[in-house]
Image (cartoon, rainbow, N blue to C red):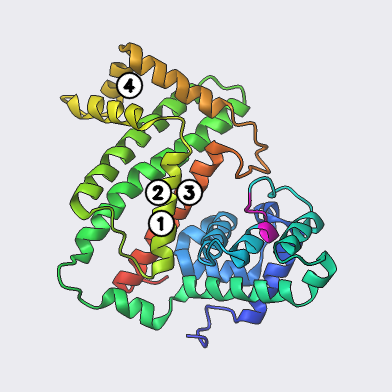
Amino acid sequence: MSGSPTVPDNAAIVSDLQELRRRGLKSLRDRRYSSLGALGRQYQGQQAADDEGTTVETMLRLAIERLGKGPLGEAARLTFGFAAGTRGMPSAARRRQAAAVYDLQPESFRKQPEHDLLTEVARELRQLALGQPDQVAAVQQPIPGVDWVERFEWYYRLWAPISGLRNDLDAALQLRNQADDEWDDYASYALVHLTRFSLVLHRFIDAHGGMWLLGDPATEDAVSEAVYQIGLNTPLSERDESWLRTQFTALAEPELHPFLRALEDSDTGRALLGEWRDWLDRCQCSAEVPTRACHVHAVIMNCDLYLAAIDQQWRKQTGRQA
C-alpha cells in the first residue's frame, strides 16, 4: 500500500501538516496542500476534488479522533485548532497549549514531541485513505448473522437526515448573516431533519441495539460519538424529541409541509420551533472562524464527521475506493 502512486508518503504528509499547523485551519479555504489534497481524493473521490478544503478538514478531524482522548489526542486537537476556542488562535498560542499537555515549554515541544505528534496524525490520515489490510479484511469476511448491505442501509437511512440537518443549519446561518428573512424557513427545515434523524436512530437502536459495525474500532467509536454529540448539542430534551417523533409518525402523510403546519398549529410545537430558532440565532461565530464552543457548529461538525466516515467505510466494504 505504501507504494500506491495516489497516496503520499508520511514525510510529505508531515510537511503539509507542519504548514497547516502554522497557517491554521482557515487556510484550507484558499490554499492547496498537495499531499493532504491527494489523501482527500483517495478518501472521498470527486467530492474531495469539488471541495478539497472541507474534505481535508473533515478527514483531519476524524484522524485526530482516532488518536483517542488521552494526551496525544488532546495535544493534536490543540495543535490544529479543533479544541474548543482554539480554531482562530495564532499558531504560537496553540503550540503553547499543546506543550502544556505534556508539561513542556513550547520550544522544547517544538523540537521532537511536536514532530512525533504530526507523524502519528500522518499515519492515521494514511490509514483513513487506504485502510490497514487486516482491518479491511476483518470487515469483508463473512460474519455469522451480519448482513452488511442491510447494515449500511441503516447507516444511510441516518445519513440522509443528517445531511439535510447539516446543510439546512448552514444555509440558515448564511441567510441570517445576510439579513435574509428566509433563514427562518431553513431553521424550520433543519428541525424536520432532526426529527427524522431521531426517528431513524430509535428504529436502528431497536433493530440492532445501536451497535456500529464498521472498518475498525476507532471509526466505530468516532461515528458513535458523532451521533451522540449531534443530539447532545441541540436544545431539545429527550421528552421534546419524543413529542416530535410522535407528532411526525401520527401524520397521514409524514412530510415536511404537514409536519411544520402541525407544529405551528400546536402550543407545544410553536414553543419548540421558537426554542429551536433561538438556539440557532445564538450562534455568533464568524463565518471564517467557527468554534467548537458553539453548539450549532458542534452539530455541523459532527454531521460532517458521520457523513464522511460512512461514505468512506462503504467504499471500503464494496471495494469502490476512489
Mark 1 or mark 3: name the one nearer the start of the chain: 1
Q: CA distance from mark 3 to mark 4?
A: 25 Å
Q: Tell me the mark number nearer the camera, choosing from 2 and 4.
A: 2
79 is within the stretch colored magenta:
yes
Q: Residue 301: x percent and y percent?
A: 52, 48
Query: Which numbered disc covers residue 223?
Result: 1
Q: Tell me the mark number nearer the camera, choosing from 3 and 4.
A: 3
Determine the secondary structure under disc 2: helix
Q: Mark 2 highlights which residue?
A: 227
Q: Residues within 10 Å of mark 2 (few under 14, many from 20)?
A: many
Which residue is at the far bottom? 3
**Is disc 1 in contact with disc 3, using a CB cutoff of under 8 Å?**
no
**Is disc 3 in contact with disc 2, using a CB cutoff of under 8 Å?**
yes
Q: Residue 38: x percent and y percent?
A: 56, 71
Which amino acid is tagged 1?
Answer: Val
Residue shown at the point (57%, 22%) measured from the top left: 180
Mark 3 or mark 2: name the one nearer the start of the chain: 2
Q: CA distance from mark 3 to mark 2?
A: 7 Å
Which amino acid is tagged 2?
Answer: Val
Q: Mark 3 highlights which residue?
A: 302
199 is within the stretch colored magenta:
no
**Is disc 2 in contact with disc 1, using a CB cutoff of under 8 Å?**
yes
Which amino acid is tagged 3?
Answer: Asn
Q: CA distance from mark 2 to mark 1?
A: 6 Å
Would you say 37 lies left or right of 318 here?
A: right
Query: Which numbered disc covers residue 260?
Result: 4
